[in-house]
Amino acid sequence: NAGVTQTPKFQVLKTGQSMTLQCAQDMNHEYMSWYRQDPGMGLRLIHYSVGAGITDQGEVPNGYNVSRSTTEDFPLRLLSAAPSQTSVYFCASSYSTGLSTDTQYFGPGTRLTVL
Amino acid sequence: AQSVTQLDSHVSVSEGTPVLLRCNYSSSYSPSLFWYVQHPNKGLQLLLKYTSAATLVKGINGFEAEFKKSETSFHLTKPSAHMSDAAEYFCVVSAEYGNKLVFGAGTILRVKS
């Protein structure tokens, strides 16, 4: 299994541009999520999904959109990039959707810079 | 709502000496607690997790953590630090239902030779 994969690894955008960060998992996990990591703040939840066709907002959803058309893929869209969205983005997945004890598996991250 | 406080932003130890990374949590229920490690420019790896079974949890690479409900703490320890332990460590609490995670701010561990 490849686990959780993310593309691209690095991206530089200009303010106002849009782009999609890709996330895929091959473990048949129902739950997928996106986090952003900023220095001194840990990771904060942006959006999550409990299955295909079902998404919901996390702690910091503004400026981001998600959709989940398949179990495997959970792309994150930046509609109009802003410098405040400069961050490292991590995708994560876990098998179940209702167990707080379930281990989440993280992708390698995408480092995004918005100029 | 649940929250996590990592009491030290940076910890520096000498190789071969004990490691202590401190974490306090706040929760209105019995939480699940995790420690994740992030090596430079890498993703996050699970070190260990507490899920209301044994209060002393053993993880990978010789790390362990003890859940103390009375102190609302979940400190991470290792008897003898190795150079490869240098990384950032995150204490994490889960939501009561579902899979949402709340992260602490992180502790950067430096190991001196």
Image: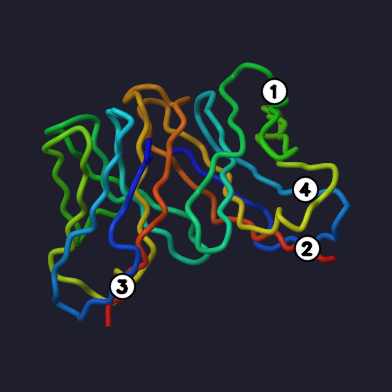
Q: Name the residue under label 3.
A: A84
Q: What residue type is labelled 4?
A: Leu
The residue drawn where x is 77% and y is 61% is: B111
Helix, strand or loop for disc 1 = loop
The picture quadrant where one finds residue A28 is top left
**Placement of the N terminus of chain B among the 4 image quadrants:** top left
The alpha-carbon separation of the residues under discs 3 and 2 comes to: 31 Å
* Marks 1 and 4 share the same chain: yes
Nearest-to-viewer mark from 3 and 2:
2
Helix, strand or loop for disc 2 = strand
Residues at circles 1 and 3 in contact by the CB criterion of under 8 Å: no
Q: Which amino acid does label 3 sit on?
A: Ser
Q: Name the residue under label 1.
A: B55
Q: Which amino acid does label 2 sit on?
A: Ser
* Marks 1 and 2 share the same chain: yes
The residue drawn where x is 54% and y is 50% is: B104
Chain holding disc 4:
B
